[in-house]
Image (cartoon, coloured by chain):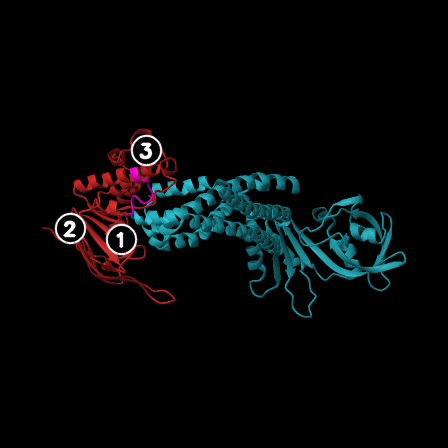
Chain colours: A red, B cyan
Amino acid sequence: MDAPVIRLEEVRKVYPRPAGDVVALNGVSLSIEEGEFVAIMGASGSGKSTLLNQLGCLDVPTSGRLLIDGTDVRDLSDIELTNLRRDAIGFIFQKFNLIPLLTAYENVELPLIMKHRRRDVSGRPAELLRKVGLEGEMITHTPPELSGGQQQRVAIARALANNPRILLADEPTGNLDSKTGTQIMDLLADLHQEGRTIVMVTHDARTAAYADRVVTISDGRIAR
Amino acid sequence: MIFSRILFDLATRNVRLHFLRSLLAAVGIVIGVLAITAMGMMGSTLQLSVSSQLSEGANTLVVYPYMTTGSDEGITERQLRDIKLSAGTNPVIPIMSGSDRIAVGSEDGYASVYGLDPGDIGEIAEVDRGVSVRGGEGALVGPALAREYDMRVGSRITLGPEGGRSLRVVGILKESGFSGAIMTDNAIVVAENTFTSIYGDKGYSMVQIVVKDLSAIDRVKESIESKMNRREDTVTVWDSRAFLDMVNEALGSISLFVMAIGGISLIVAAVSIFNVMLMSVSERIKEIGILRSIGVQKHEISLIFLYEAVILGVAGSFVGALVSLLGGYLLISFMFGDTTFFFAPQTLVYIPVGMGIGIGVCLLSGVYPALRAARLNPIEALGAE
């Protein structure tokens, strides 16, 4: 078997605060293999969002090692971290986080433009949108004109734009009704079936049931 | 840095979405550019019009005897011949001058007295009323002096030492203002032989040369200086362009000052752009977080905001330039009644200058907000509402 896609060794994250340091992660060690679907569960304040931010290279650990594809992110500059986010990681957020000014198509096209420095000519944005179930006139709408479920589909298509090795989902169904949430989870499950590595933070046991493995975080440590 | 079309598009969308706010900020720039450009153009027109009026007398050289202490020797006939030789075909007018006590009726006072060859008088001043002196006795009186002493043609005027000599006023001169070497408005002009018979012959006080071809001024000046001052300094040659330069310099500082006042309004505009950009950044913190999370670099975030500032700057400056072209034209045609100088390159250059300053100011006020946007922590930015 190949080396794990994500590997954490004794990762600590400390936020200095005037009232004293806050230890958000207190020595987390974890390996995630290629093609795995891992759910991270925990109460709010347990450190699960901090963990996801480290995995997404939005932040770097205070100490310990975090290897993405064999590279220690603490050795990377901000520019390299940004490029890693662009090329290797796809984010799916609870609040969709689409750019409200851009159409669905343009939102999906954006990471491609950032990577290739020109407008897309391959037709990939439309293809990805079709794959998540959005077609025709729908893709010319801006996010405020779409339903929550549709917005999350656009967000998933955007996350897939640069064909990343890792998909990170932060409560992907948190802002959706249960029926739409199920549809979105089915979509993620399909992506997993295709061999995509997915790490998902959730506090909902039903959602977590889609994963191969559930990691529970408590007080900045892995509980079991 | 690569020009990124999508970043530019994002910036244009932001301007469009907050159209009113952007419009107001751009209006500030319009006013600032208008103020700077209109003021600059006005100053330039003023300068051009004054110097063109003055340069009518700019073709004059005046030769004075070199001043040594205790000497009141003027330019001799021999020196005058040398000057005439150097001047070539340009008219040379030797002038005797002095100032003296004069008496008109029971009033008395002081006035300048000039002695001229009667044939040269026409070159220096025009006779308004009466006739010019023709070799014989008689005096011409400047208009201001005539008014002061209530003289008219036929009045008698007494001047000269030891009881003086009484002369008949044969003509009153026309108002001339500044013209070359001498000011005749407050003076008495008599024929050369009258002057020497009253004051004795001490030579000429000055020699005026009107150079017909302006570009020849330097040549004539050098020729006189090299001929006359070869062994020792005997004459000083005064060039009226030196005076013109002085006037121009003074006018230049006035128009710079006026432009600086215009600049204040541009500072106000800069503050408003700065404010709009800061608001734009804080309204879009979340969007910045999203862009950062999907792999947009810090400098690219800065670019979006700089583009936005430049769009406002270019639009504002462009409109400002158009308005000042129109406004400047109207203003100048009202003030001067003549727009020849408005279309001079020296005047029109203020339009690109004003636009450049306007765009520069916008860019500068966009820098800090843009850097602030780029420095935002992506996680905190994503968490913002």
Mark 3: which secondary structure?
Answer: helix
What residue would you read off at disc 3?
A139
In the visual, does A120 lie left or right of B350? left
The spot of residue B260 in percent (x, y) is 56, 53
Of A181 and B208, nearer the camera is: A181
Amino acid type of the residue that numbered disc 3 sits on in the rendered structure: Ile
Give the numbered dot on residue B280: none
Of B67 and A49, nearer the camera is: A49
For disc 1, the chain is A
Q: Quadrant of residue B228?
A: bottom right
Residue at position x 34%, y 39% from top?
A: A148
Q: Nearer the viewer, mark 3 or mark 1?
A: 1
- For marks 2 and 1, the one nearer the N-term is 2
Q: Which residue reaches farthest front?
A: A205
- Observer able to see residue B214: yes
- For marks 3 and 1, the one nearer the N-term is 1
Mark 2: which secondary structure?
Answer: loop
What residue would you read off at disc 2?
A33
Marks 3/1 same chain: yes
What residue would you read off at disc 1?
A52
Q: Which residues are magenta?
A: A170-179
